Every structure is written in C-alpha cells, then in structure tokens.
Amino acid sequence: MSVLVLTLIILVGSYFAGLLGSLTGLGGGVVIIPLLTLLLKVDIHYAIGASLVSVIATSSGSAAAYVKEGITNIRLGMFLEIATTAGAMVGALIAVYIPTHYIAVLFGVILILSAIMSLKKKAEIINQEHSALAEKLKLNSTFPTNNGSVAYKVKNVVGGFFMMMFAGTISGLLGIGSGALKVLAMDTIMRIPFKVSTTTSNFMIGVTAAASAVVYLQRGYIDPGLSMPVAIGVLLGALSGSKILVHTSSSGWLRWVFAVVVTFLASQMIYNGFTGKI
C-alpha cells in the first residue's frame, strides 16, 4: 500500500470518526484509535498521539462557539483544568511503560462506559444547594435559556476535582478527551446543569489533550504523517456533524447508532487486548 493511498484511507476514516463523534457529543477519538489499531495495525501509542492532536483541533473550534453563547462556565473549567492537566501528565508518563494489550483492554472498558453514557437520558437539574467552597471560589454562575438567564450553584467541589484528576489520567493514557468522565463528574457529582457540564467539558478537553500531547511528542509518538490526515479528517467530520445536528429533529437514533458501533469496537479492542494481538 502506497503512502498516498494510506493517507486517503486515514483521512476518510477520520472524517467519519469525527462525524459520528460530533453527532453524539463524545468526540472522534473514541472511534479513530480503534480504526488505526484494529484495521490499519498502527501501534497504539502512535494512534493515541494522532488522536490527541485531533482532540486539540476539534475542541478548540467548538469550545469557542459555546463560550461566545455564554453557556460555558469558564471559571469552573479553568479551576478543574488544574486537576485534568495534572492527571493527563501522569497518564501520559505512565502510558509508555504499560503493555499495549492492557491499554487496549482499558480503552475498550472506557468505550463501553461512553456508550452507556450516550444512551442515558439527562434531566436538566438546577441545583440551589449552598456550598461554602464554591462560593469562595466563585464557581456559581448562570446560563442562557429561552426564558432568560437561569442561576445555578455548584456542590461537591472536592469530589468533582478528584474525579477530574482521574478523567485526566485516563485521557493521558488513552488519547481521548474523556468527555464522558468529565460530564459524569460535573453532572452527577457537582450537580451542574447538563448543558453547562457538556459545554464546559468541551472547553476543558483541548487543554487536557495538549498536556498529554507534550509528553507523547517528547517520546516521539506523534508522527506528522499520521497526525495530519487524522486531524484534518476529524475536524471536517466534526464540522459536518454540527451542521447535520442543527437540522435533525431527534438525536435518539444517532445515539443508538453510536452505542452499537462503539460497543462493537470496544469488544474488538478487549478481545485483541486479551489475546495479545495489539
């Protein structure tokens, strides 16, 4: 297979990964790494490096729009980035010492968690419970709705902080944004409205990935020839997905498609990890 043909295959595959990730809100990294490792037999460390570059590109573009709309809680995001960045650095540092088949199995488990999270119906919760630490750090905020701004309060700041550290570690290990874990921390533990948690998570993902990417770059696991078509393909796919989503009346069937695809990829990653094929 020539370099040009391989690049085109990666570009097309990354486009559909970005499209599917954008339509479900969990990013293209959860699809691009199995694509590279299972179908193209790319070393998982190089696949993670390429995925991190694409995560930075897509997160930066979409996060800017949410910040402009006033939905993202910037102060909360910057505070939690301390935890995710520290965790990402740790995860990236230890990733090179962990056998690849262990990483593949862990990746499969996280994919299944992401699939479950994508199917779970989220009810909008407006927490009004007082938290002294949240007040002191000025983490409480508002977000716009059709009926005007709605105020909400943040709780369990310490618990959310440590969950974010774990999410950052997983991101550094696996090269994904760990959006499902970040949303879980903010939505379930810190009781932030779902719309705010998803947009704030998106705001944080790029910074978390950048911290991990520095370590992978120093280790020589970011190959420009691989990262370039992955980043371009995922970015174009994410842009297409955002346009399709605007004209889609219901995203329920999209989430089911995503869950089926991701569960299949997860089972393959776990199987190949246990059999030592990765």
Image: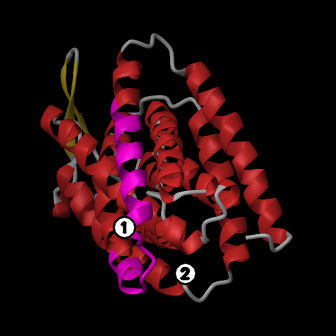
The kind of residue on which mark 1 rests is Pro
Describe residue 176's horizontal placement relative to residue 208 as left or right.
Answer: right
Q: Residues within 10 Å of mark 2 (few under 14, many from 20)?
A: many
The magenta region covers: 214-239
State the residue in front, 84 or 19: 19
Residue 112 screen position, x and y as percent:
68, 49
Magenta run includes residue 121: no
Residue situated furthest bottom in the rendering: 97
Determine the secondary structure under disc 1. Answer: helix
Q: Nearer the viewer, mark 1 or mark 2?
A: 1
**Mark nearer the N terminus (1 vs 2):** 2
- Residue receiving disc 2: 95
Residue 16 screen position, x and y as percent:
51, 36
Main SS, magenta region, reads helix
Residue 92 screen position, x and y as percent:
46, 79
Magenta run includes residue 238: yes
Q: Is residue 35 visible?
A: yes
Image position of 44 with respect to 153: above or below = below
- Residue receiving disc 1: 224
